[in-house]
């Protein structure tokens, strides 16, 4: 039998072949938001309030103050936060849009915001965008009775439409959820002008798996995305060779699973979107279940806040930046 100490150099070298993963810290919640039927689908800041968008039309938005979030993160055993409910007035999209399924994302620009909507009419998916305003005093959010603007699907994939939006000045960039090489010949994204509602396109690289939300642009014109893969989606997403995983080493849990939960940074440069040079942030996987992260925002320079929909529940987590 070989002495155990002969294996130490091998283990030392192996440690450099495994990327570091980041464990999320849960911010416990209580109240209606913990009901899976709320199905949180979007996340953004309005001032110092975190806005959590339910997918279904319940007539309200959830809000949590930044002070509450920091207080929770600074405690070893924080008490659950009960988000406030603020009035959210919308048309009855179940009557306006055939096959309406729900709201997918939200992004604020001052006191104005944009929402993307999803519908399935027969076997075809449909994606829409609409605009609303929020009262800075009452925090009442409202969408007028205008018909949402429909944007044709670049491809038809069941239950996939425009999952996230990015505001760039007077333009809104919509991100289709599936952009892998086996799904799309070219992974451009739509751009909608908030001035005249004209529609154009912007170049975007192929990226495997799903893009479920994006942060705002920073001062370097960069933004982060949630890049997620649940192995049960293999037939829908049809993953091809993953150049990101080939370029950067996998973490321990990612190396032992087909699932992917990571944050990937992009940059908006010279009128197109491209991957930045930063290493992705791999989130330590749960060995028992995938977490369907649906929303992301930056938390100052500390890291990111992320939220799941209903799998495995309504989970709000913090991901620090190393």
Image (cartoon, rainbow, N blue to C red):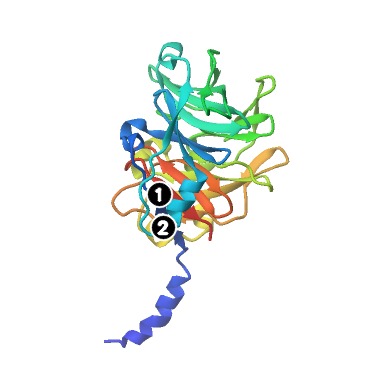
Left or right of residue 247, residue 110 in this image: right
Residue found at x 46% / y 45%: 306
Residue found at x 28% / y 51%: 288
Residue that lies at the very extreme toward the right in this rendered image: 270
Q: From the viewer's perspective, is the residue at label 2 or at label 1 nearer?
A: 2
Numbered tag placed on residue 213 in the rendering: none
> Where 263 falls versus 108 (above or below)?
below
Residue found at x 53% / y 29%: 139
Mark yes or no: residue 74 visible: yes
Quick one: label 2 or label 1, which is nearer the N terminus?
1
Give the camera-side residue of 79 and 24: 79
**Spot occupied by residue 212 in the image (x, y as percentages of width and height):** 47, 38
Task: List the residue tagged with mark 2.
Answer: 75
Count all numbered tags in the image, as a single digit.
2
Residue found at x 62% / y 34%: 167
How many angstroms separate mark 2 from mark 1 (CA)?
10 Å
> Where 218 falls versus 167 (above or below)?
below
Mark yes or no: residue 242 visible: no
Secondary structure beneath disc 2? Answer: loop
> Where 254 falls versus 98 (above or below)?
below
Crowd rating for badge 1 (residues with CA inside 10 Å; few <14, some 14–19, many 20+): many
> Where 225 falls versus 282 (above or below)?
above
Task: List the residue tagged with mark 1.
Answer: 27
Q: Quadrant of the N terminus?
A: bottom left
Crowd rating for badge 2 (residues with CA inside 10 Å; few <14, some 14–19, many 20+): few
Residue that lies at the very extreme toward the front in this rendered image: 137
């Amino acid at each position: 039998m070989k002495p155990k100490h002969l294996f130490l150099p091998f283990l030392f070298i192996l440690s450099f072949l495994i990327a570091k993963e980041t464990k999320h810290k849960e911010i416990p919640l209580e109240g209606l938001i913990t009901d899976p039927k709320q199905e949180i689908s979007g996340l953004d800041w309005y001032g110092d309030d975190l806005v959590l968008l339910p997918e279904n039309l319940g007539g309200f938005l959830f809000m949590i103050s930044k002070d509450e979030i920091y207080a929770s993160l600074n405690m070893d055993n924080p008490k659950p936060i009960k988000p406030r409910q603020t009035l959210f007035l919308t048309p009855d999209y179940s009557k306006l849009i055939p096959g309406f399924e729900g709201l997918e994302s939200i992004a604020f620009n001052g006191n104005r915001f944009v929402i993307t909507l999803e519908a399935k009419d027969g076997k075809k998916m449909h994606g829409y965008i609409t605009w609303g305003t929020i009262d800075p005093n009452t925090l009442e959010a409202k969408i007028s009775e205008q018909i949402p603007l429909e944007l044709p699907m670049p491809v038809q994939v069941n239950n996939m439409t425009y999952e996230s939006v990015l505001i760039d000045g007077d333009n809104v960039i919509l991100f289709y959820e599936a952009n892998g090489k086996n799904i799309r010949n070219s992974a451009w994204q739509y751009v909608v002008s908030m001035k005249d509602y004209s529609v154009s396109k912007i170049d975007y690289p192929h990226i495997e798996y799903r893009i479920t939300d994006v942060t705002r642009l920073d001062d370097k014109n960069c933004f982060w995305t949630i890049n997620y893969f649940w192995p049960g989606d293999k037939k829908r997403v049809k993953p091809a060779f993953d150049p990101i995983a080939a370029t950067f080493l996998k973490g321990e849990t990612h190396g032992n699973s087909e699932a992917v939960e990571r944050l990937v940074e992009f940059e908006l440069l010279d009128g197109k979107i491209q991957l930045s040079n930063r290493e992705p942030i791999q989130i330590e996987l749960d060995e028992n279940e995938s977490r369907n992260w649906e929303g992301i925002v930056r938390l100052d320079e500390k890291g990111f806040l992320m939220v799941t929909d209903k799998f495995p529940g309504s989970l709000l987590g913090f991901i620090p930046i190393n």
